[in-house]
Image (tube, rainbow, N blue to C red):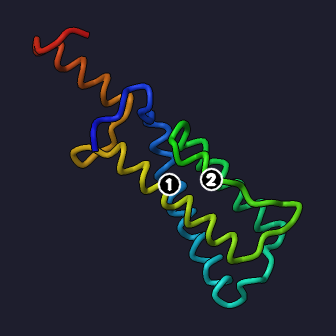
Amino acid sequence: MPPTPEQDLPTEEQVARFEMLTPMLKSAHDEIRELSNKKPDGMLSKAKVKWVNQLLGDARDVLGNDQSVEYLDMLDDEQLPENSDAALLLGRYLAAMTHYRQCHWRSGEWDTVERREEDKRVRAEMGYETI
């Protein structure tokens, strides 16, 4: 993938939140998918919807301006979703997180605002380019 424009790069803080949220989203997806396999049309409880929506909201914040965000909804806490709908939605979030990582992963590490700034500073010190 081509390098990401600097204005679209994540910060180190976003990366830390990404790394914390991804296994939690995966765990939620696995649990709800298991519920969906047992009882696809069963409804999630309000407590589960609240908990999952907290994860989804945080994931949306991390994804920021990523194009995938326009396809990522929250669970409806008024009309409780079926297990299968929640599993599908969590799968979309996981796919968006995977895509985000692919877009911002270079040479075995995250391509972040801070990394680019450090690269520029080092190159300037070495006389390769000015800041």
Picture residue at 45% right of the left edge, 33% below the top:
11
The quarter in which the N terminus is drawn is top left
**Alpha-carbon neighbours of circle 1 within 10 Å: few (<14), some, or many (≥20)?**
many
Tell which of 71 and 46 is nearer to you. Answer: 71
Question: In the image, what residue occupies the spot 78% across and 74% down?
Answer: 44
Q: CA distance from mark 2 to mark 1?
A: 9 Å
Instruction: Return the x and y of residue 41 as percentages of the image width and height.
Output: 76, 83
Q: Secondary structure at mark 1?
A: helix
Q: In x, y percent, where is residue 56? A: 65, 54
The residue carrying mark 1 is 96
Residue 72 bears which disc, if any?
2
Left or right, 128 with respect to 84, comes to left
- The front one of 114 and 91 is 91
Residue 2's place in the image compared with 28, above or below, is above
In this rendering, is residue 57 above or below 48?
Answer: above
Residue drawn 24% across and 17% down?
121
Marks 2,1: beta carbons within 8 A: yes
Q: Counting other residues with Cα less than 10 Å from the Cα at mark 2, is it few (<14), some (14-19), or many (20 or more)?
A: some
Determine whether 57 is above or below 25 in the image: above
**Residue type, numbered disc 1:** Ala
Q: Is residue 10 left or right of residue 33?
A: left
Residue 114 image offset from top left, x and y in percent: 36, 28
| Label 2: which secondary element | loop
Work out whether residue 82 or residue 21 is closer to the camera in this orientation and state it: 82
The image position of residue 32, as x and y in percent, is 65, 76
- Indicate the quadrant where residue 27 lies: bottom right
In the image, residue 84 sits, relative to residue 55, either above or below, namely below
